[in-house]
Amino acid sequence: MSGFSGVSKTLNRVCFPGTDSADAGIRDQDNLPVPQQIQISNVTCDSFKISWDMDRRGRERITHYFIDLNKKENRKENRFKHKDVPTKLVAKAVPLPMTVRGHWFLSPRTEYTVAAQTAAKQPDGEYSVSQWSEIIEFCTADYSTVHLDQLLQKAEAIAGRMLPFSVFYRNQQREFFCQARDAQCHCMLPAVKDSSGSRGSPISGKLEGIFFSCNTEFNTGEPPQDSPYGSYRFQIQADILFNQNTNIYFGDFYCMYTSYHYVILVLAPDGSKGDVFCKGRLPALDRSNNPFLTCSKEAEGSPCFRHAQDVILEVIYTEPVDLSLGTVSQIRGHQLMSLSTLNAKKDPSCKICNISVGR
């Protein structure tokens, strides 16, 4: 963190943004310039730059800056508590703008409030401080491709051996397929991805697509009969969605406080709207040589499809899919609703699927 460190000792008699202190230990409060017109720039998933204007009067006395950083939803109850070390920052006075960086208190895609205060450290260790600046709001960014590459490497490490498969499938309630048939011109339409998985994933709440599965049971080589999403299944031959005209991208890697790990992949026809979205945002995979999902050709020229054994693949196809291209039938397994990943929150403590930025 450039210039900043978490507060490592008690800051005696520091007042809070929007309040005045009656404590005699704070001296010359009016003689230090108050930060004005705070500007936040260069925002990433775990860092930002902060700068502000201030009067020249008293500037030469400033030795430190105090920063009060809070998640927006907790602003009222999360004041400048001395024990609340992770979000309460002190910096030596250095030229502005300064970079604030730290995955232990900044999370991706999170709204924060920030206020600043100038301070002059006294010989007895006390601080003279200015009044707090106005409180402003900002939001951290998604994972960058660098962070996604780190997630990708972690996922590759546990993907396991590859198993053959021949169909993609989507499990839902009967009403879902009736709606697609009767009100959507016999098509399943892309929908915006929910918030499941890593908080910093750039596809959550942005990418439109249709979720499919492809994992098979080890002993039968067929899709499992159990489902957390419904007792009806649409099944489509793999080569219709995944072929030489389809690009494949890595989207996310996560778990839900269980031993199961999920990898999200995106299949986007070359040049499609979804393909344009993914380019530059997500790591592209080699469709015939990657550890998760491959499309290659056998010696005689027929297509061959394989999926990773040791992770559960969630495949997002970015274009509409006509129901006439596959079949809809009822499955007879258990409805394991507890395994649904709808808006599932990632386990932030898992060492297998987390990287050293906000979860």
Image: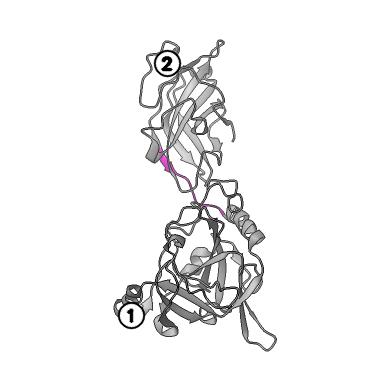
What is the residue that sits farthest to the bottom in this orientation?
300
Q: Where, by quadrant of the figure, is residue 71 drawn?
A: top left
Residue 254 position in % (x across, y down): 54, 56
Task: Choose between 177 and 340: the one closer to the eye.
Answer: 340
Query: Image point 55% across, 14% down: which residue?
Result: 125
Q: How many marks?
A: 2
Residue 268 position in % (x across, y down): 51, 71
Where residue 181 is drawn, which disc sits there? 1
Q: Residues within 10 Å of mark 1 (few under 14, many from 20)?
A: some
Q: Is residue 122 on the magenta stretch? A: no
Q: Secondary structure at mark 2?
A: helix
Q: Give the vertical position of 85 relative to 119 (above or below).
A: below
Q: Secondary structure at mark 1?
A: helix
Residue 177 position in % (x across, y down): 35, 76
Q: Tell me the kind of residue under disc 2.
A: Gln
Lateral position of residue 332 relative to residue 167, left or right: left
Residue 107 position in % (x across, y down): 50, 44
Residue range highlighted in magenta: 137-144
Q: Give the vertical position of 139 relative to 36 (above or below).
A: below
- Nearer the camera: disc 1 or disc 2: 1
Q: Which residue is mark 2?
A: 29
Q: Residues within 10 Å of mark 2 (few under 14, many from 20)?
A: some
Q: Give the vertical position of 34 relative to 303 (above or below).
A: above
Q: Main secondary structure of the magenta part?
A: loop
Q: Is residue 138 on the magenta stretch? A: yes
Lateral position of residue 308 relative to residue 51, left or right: right
Q: Give the vertical position of 203 relative to 92 (above or below).
A: below
Tell me if label 1 and label 2 are in contact, CB under 8 Å. no
Q: From mark 1 to mark 2, how far is it between C-alphas?
A: 70 Å
Lateral position of residue 112 relative to residue 6, left or right: left
